Image (cartoon, grey):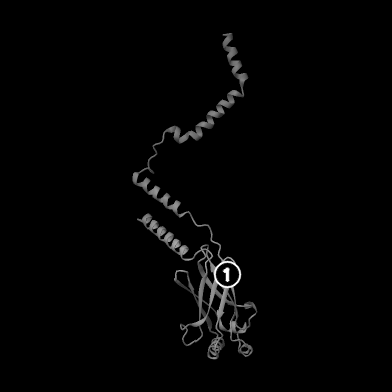
Amino acid sequence: MKVTLVYISLIISLIITFVRTQSVAFDSSISIQLFHALDSNNPDSFTSRGNISIVSINSADYQINQKPLKQNELQLFKDLAKNGKFYRLRAEVISTDGIKTSFLTSSKACHLMESQLHDFLTISFDHNNVVVSINLRPVNLETFSDCDDSFLKSVNSNAFNTVVTLKNIDIAPSPDTVGFIQKLEREREQRERGENSKDNRSFLQKYWMYIVPAVILLLISGVSNPEAQGSASGNGNQR
């Protein structure tokens, strides 16, 4: 029963991998819609921020279009920063067959404000050019302050300046699942036939690795000591 379940899981995994591979052609274009949550009173309310069109994954060729923040949106953003809240970004990846996959990432709003809305967006792909993660972070994150109110006065930008990085994730060698399942199946069949508890091999088949070296040593010792053989032959002639 356990082996059957393992087989079923393996087949489902192979089918999912095949479907995902077919849904994104090699080095095909990808569209990503960006939405952000600015209202701290409605944290699950997302509005449009812009979109990214990836023309070529291999050459990291992309185009990004983002909307400037309206005055009320900028004020909501400042309120998030002032209250130590997180800025949340939702990215919807649209494959060539229309399937949407959503990713959620966040950063402290005050850090984004302090960076003058200058941020990095890292898009990671697996070996099939399928998006597996999207992460947002402000520039110069290591030099930010403790998010006091003073930085809000220096904010003079209402438009995002985003640098997109396309990253391929190295996949570790996968385990030999098929070989392991086949081994389990053979062991199960052997147990059912009772072959594990009884060894029907002959004596020579079991211990040939010990017998052959002993015979070789005897032959070598006989060849290397011809005088003893000659002396024994001479004594026999004298009689």
Q: Position of residue 195 (x, y in %)?
A: 37, 42
Rendered-image quadrant of the C terminus: top right
The foreground one among 171 and 212 is 171
Q: Residue at x 59, y 12 (%)?
A: 235
Above-or-below relation of 25 to 31: above
Q: Position of residue 69 (x, y in %)?
A: 55, 86
The foreground one among 236 and 123 is 123
Q: Residue at x 62, y 90 (%)?
A: 153
Q: What residue does disc 1 label?
A: 166
Residue at the extreme right: 143
Q: Amino acid at mark 1?
A: Leu
Residue at the extreme top: 239
Q: Tell me how many marks there are.
A: 1
Above-or-below relation of 119 to 60: below
Q: Residue at x 58, y 16 (%)?
A: 232
Look at the numbered disc 1 and give the secondary structure of its residue. strand
Q: Position of residue 173 (x, y in %)?
A: 53, 57
Rendered-image quadrant of the N terminus: bottom left
Among the 4 quarters of the image, the one containing residue 165: bottom right
Above-or-below relation of 183 to 236: below
Above-or-below relation of 37 to 198: below
Among the 4 quarters of the image, the one containing residue 84: bottom right
Within-10-Å neighbours for mark 1: few <14, some 14–19, many 20+: many
